[in-house]
Amino acid sequence: MELMRMGYNVSDELIGTFAPIILYWVYSGIYVMLGSLENYRLHTKKDEDEKNLVPKLDVVKGVLLQQAVQSIVATILFAVTGSDESAQAQQTSLVVLIRQFFVAMMVLDTWQYFMHRYMHHNKFLYKYIHSQHHRLIVPYAYGALYNHPVEGLLLDTIGGALSFLISGMSPRTSIFFFSFATLKTVDDHCGLWLPGNLFHLFFRNNSAYHDIHHQLYGNKYNFSQPFFVMWDRILGTYMPYSLEKRVGGGIEARPTKECKDN
């Protein structure tokens, strides 16, 4: 099936492959421009520049590498699954779309929680693979997909492929799902707590929740990503926090006293 875009025939598969990548950089760029709003930052700009253990240029290169791998896998996946137009035509009802979205969200969350948690508890995987992402002690938007290539393949690319296959969504539906998932992931790493942020209103898993995980005291907590917090709550890795005003301006996510005592 193809969509008409500016007089050209552009396949759903092509859009589904590259729309999330374009949105990643556009949405990240918006947060870069908003980074000067110190009163809404979870960390100061100075901390972002001094505490992180990797240059920003290396982060950009790492993200582009992961996105290249994702594009290749997506192309192969769409080619293998094919495009059955008659089957897709039956998947246009709102109920079916909602079901597919929900199933895909649950599959992605489940896969990423257990893989993410295992990478923290396996000393070899953490030291040589997952620790690369945690070089960003102070997260920022376009560092959301800064991972070791192996982690990018295991967590994000394979997790995305499984959510696509198990949910049974069409390439056209995948355009919206993976674009939404991309925006959510960028938002979780944005380092800002902006009033009226819809992601914060609808999801407990948000920029403050994930910021806790990037700190040393939260390293073994708040593994859930990118949508819900259910696995953390069920399996005892949920670290509650409070948002408090930081001396000198800004907002800080702090674990509750009960967590500190533990």
Image (cartoon, helix red, strand yellow):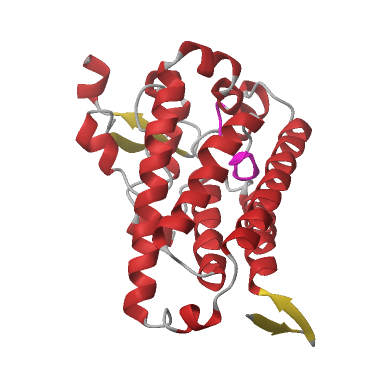
Q: Is residue 194 visible?
A: yes
In the picture, measured across the screen, residue 68 lies left or right of residue 218, that is: right
The answer to whether residue 231 is magenta is no
- For the point 67% across and 81% down, which residue is it? 2
In the picture, measured across the screen, residue 63 lies left or right of residue 234, that is: right
User: Which is the main secondary structure of the residues drawn in magenta?
Assistant: loop
- For the point 63% across and 24% down, which residue is it? 52
Residue 63, image quadrant: top right
In the picture, measured across the screen, residue 192 lies left or right of residue 23, that is: left
Q: Position of residue 68 (x, y in %)?
A: 73, 46
The answer to whether residue 140 is magenta is yes
The quarter of the rendered structure image containing the N terminus is bottom right
Q: Position of residue 199 (x, y in %)?
A: 42, 57
Depth order, front residue of 215/253: 215
Q: Is residue 66 above or below residue 9?
A: above
Q: Is residue 75 above or below residue 132?
A: below
Toward the bottom, the furthest residue is 7
- For the point 27% across and 32% down, which residue is it? 238
The magenta region covers 137-145
Depth order, front residue of 69/189: 69
